[in-house]
Image (tube, rainbow, N blue to C red):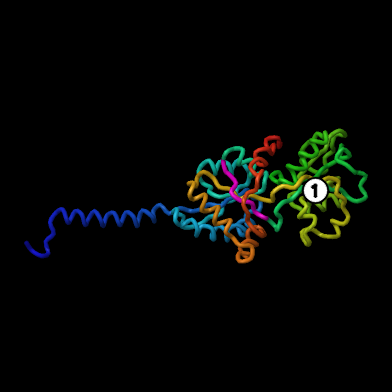
Amino acid sequence: MSPHRMDRPSLLGTVTLLLACCLLFFGRTAYAQTLVLAQISDRPKKDYRQLRPMADHIVQAMAPFGFRRAEVRLYPDLPAFEQAIRNGQVHWITETPLTAARLYQHQLAIPVARKWKRGQQTYQSLIYVAKDSPIHNLGDLAGRIMAFEHPDSFTSFFLPLQALRQAGMTLVPLDSPHQSVPADKVGYTFSRNERNNLLWVDKGIAAAGALNDGDWSIPDRLPAELVQRMRIIHRSPSYPRAFEMVTSTLEPEAREALQQALLSLDPERDRPLLQRYEKSSRITPLEAGDLDLLRSLEVETLP
């Protein structure tokens, strides 16, 4: 037999081995996945810039699970966000307790860590009025206008709305802050951001506003001279500032890897990366009671 001749079984074995190697190589390439970090946003350009560096960092820890690149996706409202999750288009979420509770209660995502956003581990809602206002308690807001910040705001919509309801007030939405309000109700409208909220109260457009205590106390967040002209009439309990969550689109091992990658971020070593991530200072484990909190928030009572 010629020394260059190969019998049929050996030839078939070699071909099979080569084919397996090709499938392994090209299969990994073909099935390379994109890790998607998402949240609700009404300022997509700013939020994209804040989230993208962290997504690019964390995806490196996800390579063993087939993830080769990261992407940030921002959704205009909760229905669009939830539909994307149901469609398997989202893996990882960073959100405040309001949206986190909605997703957890709807069985669309579970929390894996706390985020200290803007340097705050916890925060609370404040309802405030002008210093010279005749309003001294929540009951005094009857017949007046309340300025909330945004329909998806935990501390500037959900919590103050709940506080007013618990005080026996009936709230009615307004199309404009210039509408009249029934004498026995509190009208409300949305200022869209913290500065507007404060300005509306200062200019008398709204009788009261709602912000979180970080907006109020952290220097340079709001004009100090305006803050000094205000008086706080209500403080809510404190709540976790933000949660990192994962969806069932990730396999359990991949979820754990993402969680560990987040928790391994060092406040000193990774300070620049954390600061870019919505001005975070650290990411820490969940605490006892966090799941009960998300389960107990009455998010379905929102208008």
Q: Quadrant of the N terminus?
A: bottom left
Residue ID for mark 1:
126
Along the viewing direction, whichever of 245 and 208 lies nearer the viewer: 245
Residue 58: image x %, image y %?
A: 54, 58
Residue 197: image x %, image y %?
A: 79, 50
Q: Quadrant of residue 222?
A: bottom right
Residue 292: image x %, image y %?
A: 65, 40
Q: Residue at x 64, y 65 (%)?
A: 268
Magenta portion: prevailing SS class: strand
Along the viewing direction, whichever of 42 and 39 lies nearer the viewer: 39
Amino acid at dot 1: Leu
Q: Quadrant of residue 274?
A: bottom right
Residue 279: image x %, image y %?
A: 67, 59
Q: Secondary structure at mark 1?
A: strand
Above or below residue 6? Residue 130 is above
Residue 115 on the magenta span: yes
Residue 94 on the magenta span: no
Q: Quadrant of the C terminus?
A: top right
Q: Quadrant of residue 80?
A: top right
Above or below residue 245? Residue 141 is above
Q: Which residues are magenta?
A: 108-116
